[in-house]
Image (cartoon, rainbow, N blue to C red):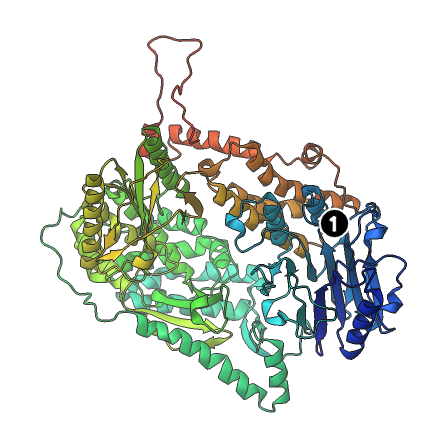
Amino acid sequence: MFQFIFTFAKGIEYCYEHGKSLPSNVSLMVGKRVLQSSVASDDQDVILITETWLCEDIDSLELFDDRYLVFRRDRGSSSDSCRRGGGVLIAVKKCFNPCILDLPGSDLEAVWLSIKLNHRQKMLVCVVYFPPSSRADTYVEFFDCFENFGFFDNILICGDFNLPIYDDFGNNKNPLVIELSNFVNLYNLALFNNTFNCNNKFLDLIFTNIDFSHISVWHSDKPLVPEDKHHPALSISICFVADHPNRKNVNISRYDFRRADFLTMWCFFREIDWSFLLNFNDIDKAVFSFYDCLNDVFSRTVPLKQTVTRRFPFWYTIETRRLLKRKARVRIFALKCVNPDSVDEFRALRSAVNSNYDIKNEFKSNCVGDLVKIDSVTYDDVGLAIKELKSSLTVGVDNIPSFIIKGCAEFFIYPLLILFNLSLRSNVFPYVWKQTRIIPVFKKGDAQDRKNYRPIAILSPMSKIFESIIHKRLFHQVKNLISPSQHGFIPKRSTATNLFCLTNKIISSFQIGSQLDVIYTDFSKAFDSIDFGILLNKLHGLGFHVNLTDWLHSYLCNRSLYVYFNNAVSREFSGTSGVPQGSNLGPLLFILFINDLTSVFKYSECLLFADDLKLFSSMNSNLDAVLLQSDLDCLFKWCTVNKLHLNIEKCSILSYTRKSQPLNHVYKINDLVLSRSDSVTDLGIIFDTKLDFSQQINSMVSRAYRRLGILKRKTREFSSEIALKVLYYAHVRSSLEYCSIIWDPIYRNKIEIIERIQNNFLRYLLYKKNGIYLQDVSSSYLRHMFNIPSLCSRRDVSCVLFFYKVINGSIDCTDILSAINFAVPARSLRNQGSFPNVYSRF
């Protein structure tokens, strides 16, 4: 039995119990008296009981007083009335206005209720009992029932599922547990019962989508009926709060570019004679004069707006807000708890950066010559860069949105051309464009822990335009110097090409009956740890002209950063290492920094995606393992010399083989043993030792169900079929097709598991169109009706397109191209194919 304690400003208390012994023929009167006495002495708001063993001869008034409305599903009321036992029950206090949700014709032992929490929210409460050895169809029918009830902000499901649950969906092979996993993900539910029975298992499950901070589950110390040791009584307390508590707001004035007078702005820009910028020799002074002109125009043509900002962050609990309301010094408390904390938290980033590096190392004398240089940029370069700039309303550090620059491009090209060339002539990058605004974005977990935030860097759009020009010119000159093993941030390469190269190596190893040992490494904050002196040394060694390295030195050094959080601004601090985050040049500079790493490996191969390194070699004897260990030692030495740090705890070894007795060698980095795994997530794809991809498919399906559930909950007011399709394509289908050429299943059961997600969405589209859910409509009919092809057919097309792009050069990967065995006969043969050697990974 679940003892349900709803806390709704006050609270709701739930009580769940397993009442198997309640009214047997012998102890009927005793059981009724025990239950009546317990209900009268306690004050539960909702009571749920499974295996009630009730029949229609027993009236609910014999069990509960007039405070409760009782809803039952007795075994005798179902089609199998010849069987004794079973039955479920929910008793709810009348003040919650419960409403029964019935499904005519259903034989499920379940009760669904809608409980009104307040004038905004309702809650779906369900209690269910599955007899032992229930058929799979019974579980599927139960899961499908929820589509008929519409949408609820809050869901609570309690019951005896009689399933071998449930600690890890991803590794559980039971098909019923996998079905339960998909259902849980679709409705964003979580399991909350941690009370084990006498056998150290839990058969009674509690699923809810309520935030964990608002729900508590514990073993009830006052069960309503004699407790079954296999089904301990549980109490549940759920706290509900108002959706939108009163808040005081802060108003800040900013330019409202949405309501700007663009015609007048255009006229003002047309009248400016930018030739005065030619008189400057100091790039910083020139840039300041440039912005003075811009701000003068904006002050005349762009109105100000009041930006309303919440005083309290969204993660404040209702208890904190209620406490703040009781205090007279609300404003002082808010300033104390929000602004200084945010400044202090992110100011610590400054002290965490290693500031002891010497960035003025002398250049190596054995360089290859001045092969890479950029003397100036052209008018067309600036025009094309502005055209390719992403249009956005988001303002940069200079408070100018990019759409203004794109809209007035003809007036910006000439002054920017003057500033860019002045910067290159003076070998100085403008200080204003080195300023970076850091906006912390909450990811998940404890909102008070700064580690749970992702720093997003906002740069000036002028800086992005300049960097994109330099990036194009640089990459064109250094692309032939970049290792073919590097797939990150390289045009015509991707995560798919990286993983395909690895998969091809694994399959080739399987075909010859060998073993492939792959070492997955993890660099600690590699992008933020680049030493400027070492980087500039390497660039000079690659042939960068001294003027270009001086300009890059100015670009990297003395960058100013500040944190912007909830309308509070921290003090500025400097970054003394690492490539600039959010920049166009940063990734290319990092790739050039790490480029020589591939040359240190003598006996093994490697693959890179930016800082993601895989080291692998075929294992035919212990000597091969010793040689791979030798390359690992070279990797550690390279990291020491280049001042990069390996997170050895996160490095792991995976041996791909189908041998019954694989060779398990102990690999070490800096005398620390690497952990050996059975599976690893590589660039978002889960690989296992057999290259089976079952874990990948199960994880992907669970994630897709979660996203589909969010889509359905957030689009309950939508009526546009096109809008729903676009959201499905972007948020659900995209996750089901990422790198599908790697894991594309060949077994029918796996294909059907994936297709069921899209079928669920198709039924949702039909519901939006007709207003009812139809379970018996064929998926092929729905696909034809809404013109959505099957996921299987899309994967086939994607595979063909991938190889088409490889052959035609749209994908630049020589390893993949060399793996294709072209048949070029001396004369035309009618029956010979172009690709005679085709292998399966299974």
Q: Is residue 564 above or below residue 49?
A: below
Q: In which quarter of the image is the C terminus?
A: top left
Viewed as shown, does residue 760 lie left or right of 69? left
Residue 468: percent from left, percent from top: 36, 52
Name the element at disc 1: helix
> Badge 1 is on which residue?
145
Viewed as shown, does residue 555 lie left or right of 8? left
Residue 633: percent from left, percent from top: 19, 51
- Residue placed furthest toward the left: 365
Q: What residue type is labelled 1?
A: Cys
Res 493 seen here: no
| Picture quadrant where residue 418 is located | bottom left
Res 618 seen here: yes
Residue nearest the observer in this picture, 263 or 752: 752
Residue 813: percent from left, percent from top: 34, 35
Residue nearest the observer in this picture, 596 or 624: 624
Viewed as shown, does residue 613 lie left or right of 671? right
Q: In this view, does 658 lie above or below 632?
A: above
Rendered residue at 57%/79% (across/down):
250
How many discs appear? 1
Q: In which quarter of the image is the N terminus?
A: bottom right
Tell me the crowding category of disc 1: few under 14, some 14 to 19, or many 20 or more residues within 10 angstroms, Cα based: some
Residue nearest the observer in this picture, 186 or 4: 4
- Residue placed furthest toward the front: 26
| Picture quadrant where residue 50 is located | bottom right
Residue 107: percent from left, percent from top: 80, 47
Residue nearest the observer in this picture, 128 or 710: 128
- Residue placed furthest toward the bottom: 328
